[in-house]
Image (spheres, rainbow, N blue to C red):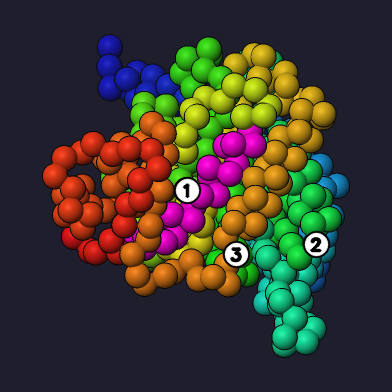
Amino acid sequence: MRKAPLLALLLLICWSSAPALEVSGMRLWTGPDHTRVVFDISEPVEHSVFALSGPDRIVIDMQGAKLAASVPSTDDSSTRLKGIRTGTRDGGDLRVVLDLQHELKPRTFLLPPSGPHGHRLVVDLHDSESRREQPEDRRSVRRARDSGPATRPRDLVIAIDPGHGGEDPGAIGYHGTREKEVVLQIARRLQRMVEAEPGMRPLMTRDGDYYVSLRERSALARENQADLFISLHADAFKHPAAHGSSVYVLSQRGASDEAARWLANRENAADRVGGVDLRDKDDQLASVLLDLSQTATLDASFQLGEKVIGQLKTLGRVHRGQVQQAPFAVLKSPDLPSILVEVAFISNPDEERRLNDTSHQQAVARSLMNGIREYFQDRMPERGLMAEGPVEHVIQRGETLSHIAQRYQVNLNRLRDFNQIDDDRVRAGEVLRIPVAQAE
């Protein structure tokens, strides 16, 4: 009996019965300047993308792929997409055709498994330069700065950053509440309060269910010369009993405690979950990791954080009574007072329920607004946040010299020498002179 033909036949049968690469899901996300199409795939796929005109359409071919998902509706993306068609070509490749309202420029990249997602193929459809417009909130801020008499005081710009969005749901509560949705609701309430406040204008980093990279969030605020940046979250901790709100400012020297480290690690991974192509970001990453030794900016962030945490205490018990520090990437603006607020722990069932209560959302937004108002009453930007001389700090009850040194990002020994202190004993009410931070 000849075994070689039989072996070849068996191999052919096994090969022909091997499972095809599977596309198990398709999703659409629409942002101000592009529409994103996401394909959930069982493994990385060889693919090609090209554009055709007459009519305008984008064609995506995936080698050896099989569609096992429904095609999403394009109702929410009608400004760019007319519809989506699928079919097969060459007997085994999946073809997806995106019918367009007008010419768009495609950009694709593969993402490895991250967070709740497996492998993904991402197709971003960008408007051409001639059609690209700035979102209304950006234009309104620019008009406010460019109009009116030169002597008229400018409006204060409050950058409001609802965390996560689009592909990145953020933390998910026990009953299925998604962080990205509740923080957007609170952010919109805060936006309306800022609009009603004389002399202030809001700037939303996102105003819909789409993802904005961590770098773009802070860059948008700085581009519009925002006077402060407040990032809103409702994160989870590994222990469901964790509860209460917290306020964080940036630290490049470590986190205040275990919870701060845990949350910072989760938030800094958002770009991988949300779908950001990091292959060409070396120069951008370098620009994000700036030296934030400017004492005055960090001090202003602490002052803002203290006002906000003081107001949040009126809603109930807070997770930490003092402003905490952690290396959150979204806070890394060198000249912009920035805080990150965890309005609650969505992993706590009781707090998840309150986060879905519209009256509680309004109360949280009101506390944030009161904290912002108090901050500007004490310290207006015209006084100069980037002062060149030493800063004076009045010691509060419970503060230690090492805590103050960490807050202002200065060496502990240098702080002692600058104030001619022999030991670490300090008393509430005493005034410390903080030296201008120097590069180490």
Find residue 198 and name its label.
2
The kind of residue tagged 2 is: Pro
Give the residues drawn in magenta, as a range: 291-312
- Magenta span: predominant SS is helix
* Image quarter of residue 437: bottom left
Mark 3 to mark 2 CA distance (whole Å): 14 Å
Give SS at disc 3. Answer: loop
> In the rendered view, does 317 fall on the left or right side of 7?
right
Mark 1 to mark 3 CA distance (whole Å): 15 Å
Residue 129 on the magenta span: no
| Residue at (47, 38) in percent of width and height | 323
Quadrant into which the N terminus falls: top left
**Residue topped by disc 3:** 380
| Residue at (44, 60) in percent of width and height | 297
The kind of residue tagged 3 is: Met
Mark 2 to mark 1 CA distance (whole Å): 24 Å
The kind of residue tagged 1 is: Phe
Give SS at disc 1. Answer: helix
- First of labels 2, 1 by sequence position: 2
**Nearest the camera: 435 or 227?**
435
Quadrant into which the C terminus falls: bottom left
- Badge 2 density bin: few <14, some 14–19, many ≥20, Cα 10 Å: few
Residue 309 on the magenta span: yes
Residue 277 visible in this rendered orientation of the protein: no
| Residue at (36, 50) in percent of width and height | 431
Residue 263: image location, x then y, percent: 45, 32
Give SS at disc 2. Answer: loop
| Residue at (79, 57) in percent of width and height | 197
**Nearest the camera: 379 or 70?**
379
- First of labels 3, 2 by sequence position: 2
Camera-side mark, 1 or 3: 3
